[in-house]
Amino acid sequence: MFLACVVLALSCQAKPPTIGQPPYLRQGLGNGATICVIPDRQAKMCSLVLAASSRGSEDDTDSHGFRHLLEHVVARGHAGDVDQRLEAVGGMLLASTYRDATVLEILIPPEHLSLALDIMADLLRSPRISDSVLSQEIASIREELALVDEPARLASLLWQICYGRSGLDPLGTAEQLERATPQTLMEVFERQFRASNLVLTLYGPVELDRESSQLRALMSRIPGEPNRSEFQARKASGPVRAVSETFVGYGLPVGSFREPETAATLALCLGLARDLPGAFVVYTPSKRPGLITLGVPSADTGWKQRAARFSRSDLERLFLFARASCLSWAARETAAMGPARIQALLLAQGPDEDFAKFSKAVEDMSIDQFLEAYEALKVAISR
Amino acid sequence: MMGLLGLMFGMAPITVVQHPQAAVVNFQIVVRATSEVRDGFDTRRALAEAMARQTDDYGPAAIQRILLGSGDSSTVSVGPSAFRIGFSVPNQDWMLGISLAASMLRSPRLVGGPSRANRMPSSWQFGLLTGQAEGAVRDQDLSALFQRWIQPENVFVAVVGDVDPTLIERAWLKRMADWNGTRTRIELPVRASRLAPPSVPSLRSARIFRLSAEGNDSEIPELALATVALGVGKTSTAFRVLRVQRHDSYRQECVLLPARRGWLVTVQWAQSSNPNLQEVKSDLLRDVDRWDGETLRRSKAICRSVLERGLRWPFIWLDSETPVDRSLASEGYFAAIWQSRYGESFDLDKFLASIDSVSLDGLKAIARRIANS
């Protein structure tokens, strides 16, 4: 349903114009923030998502992991009772740190939407950061890092090999996190949670006009700023390869998620992984240059030779299945992440983004682009 | 679950779950474990994979073509209570789906092959796995197991999608009414198909720990609520004890899984150091003793949100790969499991009413049993 939505995009304007009842509203506010409301009468839960773009606070050697730590701190709320209030009515809060944004998502039954808006207002306030709060959250993140599994570690390693410093893992390291202080985290908060970095999206059985006004009122309280910062450039070194305990990982750099070349690369990896026991593919849709990881069990010693010798007709056969696998992946991702989260994540990277463009890219990809993706994989295999 | 209909004919029921806007029709063939079937996890998985791989009517390439429109291969998973084969076809091909499902049951070519993971289970999911790798499965074992096990009374089929239940039932009846489960084709010569142990990704340094206890089929409302109160959410007992109080663990959950008989409740957590299990149990029990009316209300609210509204916090798992969520596949799989357990279609309203009637004392009694296990 989300993929079929028509988008009404309004650019940044000081005074929002009157709008009709399109299926889906996206609006830039005078202070630089963006709101997006996606009504769906069939939905049984509301999803209210705040995405804070990492524009201007990208992970660097001195600071990677700080946004992750900040996410933990912000998600506590001022009184530390956010989870209690939400779960009492059958709701929940999810918080995640991606390379391109930090995402806070409240899932809640529609009759309790006002509670979600109250809590979101609380989360948007400057957090109270004490040394003891930092210690507790760093201890929690130590356990979180201990839980990172091999595919995620391999993908993270490939990102660093491919993108160098700008490919650092946003989860951070335990050693790095120990360097954070309340003051450094407040600085990250002020950079990251400024109005022009924020996107608030709402999905559910809601009234477009009424809920748009509420979102607008909530986000308009945040002071504006004259200029929006831009993302630091991210430059790939080319296809890369790395080995972990039980996998060989191939990292294929790609452009924006809406480019057919990206769709072709993802389709190739999904198509190959489909019938390869134990293989995995990792990709997070991004407008920025990204990386698709194909992980192959190292126990399958013959795969490298087989994969390097595909003929054109092999690939033409694979193309059909790969395209279908890719569309199926997009549908699964949309279902798993939910329209509000995926839309917030993309809008945090820039206006005019919409995951529906990915399906269009899959439809548009050509066999030649698929063959080019295979050539890139061959480069990674040969490394 | 909307539009749930059931039809009993002969001894093998088919359940149809209507989803008016679904883009594909999903089929789930669920075969319940019986006390006669002692074969292990890998043998059961190999049988399921062989049945899904090819049949007398459909070779591997033909099956691939049928499933192409859905974008997915067939899915096979094995739990302590059953195994299942699932696949989807585009809406217009529902009749072909019926034919393929019937053929997988009536005339599979039971030839072993490389084990095919649908998707690699995460280490977290693997913690829920109760089977052990056996190393080798022979085609003759598959054939014997098929003849012993794949009988109409053990097979439950669910069809989920934008379908007409009457047409589905009629088509199924036409193909399966005379099925007695005995005919199968045995490929010779027999050879051993060695199965590699499941490939499970390692964690950086944490290990998975768990406490489990079984409950009866009749205790399902109390078990479901206790699962939520013990380990779903950041106000659950497991979160309070293992993360906030003991600082032991980042991730901790409680899940409910159908066991061979009854249901299995598992509190699972990841930890980078070695826990003192006695201390953990004592702390969990102390927390359970403090449960009050608010705990009960919260658990019921979350239970309702997950089951009725699809809150993404699944706490019922059908096997280590399949949470009960709002996907067509899991809905069909759950419907079939429910039918096999309770002899009736799953009725969400009835189930939620039974959950509403659980008392605080009943909830605590079950939770103490689990924490004490």
Image (spheres, coloured by chain):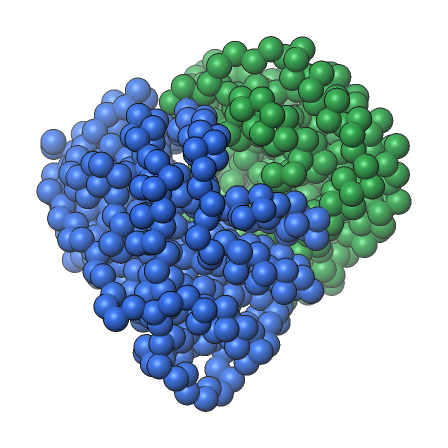
For the point 47% across and 65% down, the residue is: A201
From the viewer's perspective, is residue A256 above or below residue A71? below
Note whether residue A330 is visible.
yes
Which of the pair B170/B14 is nearer the observer?
B14
Which of the pair B79/B194 is nearer the observer?
B79
Determine the image quadrant of residue B259.
Answer: top right
For the point 78% across and 33% down, the residue is: B291
Name chain B's colour: green
Give percent across and percent down for residue B42: 54, 21
Give percent across and percent down for residue A50: 45, 58
Note whether residue B332 is visible.
no
Determine the image quadrant of residue A195.
Answer: bottom left
For the point 86% across and 40% down, the residue is: B358
From the viewer's perspective, is residue B40 above or below residue B327? above
Give percent across and percent down for residue A110: 65, 64
Which of the pair B369/A255 is nearer the observer?
B369
Give percent across and percent down for residue A296: 30, 31
Side of B344 relative to B229 (left or right): right
For the point 67% across and 61% down, the residue is: A112
Quadrant containing the C terminus of chain A in the rendered view: top left
Determine the image quadrant of residue A376.
Answer: top left
Name chain A's colour: blue
From the viewer's perspective, is residue B325 above or below residue B309? above
Count of residue discs: 0
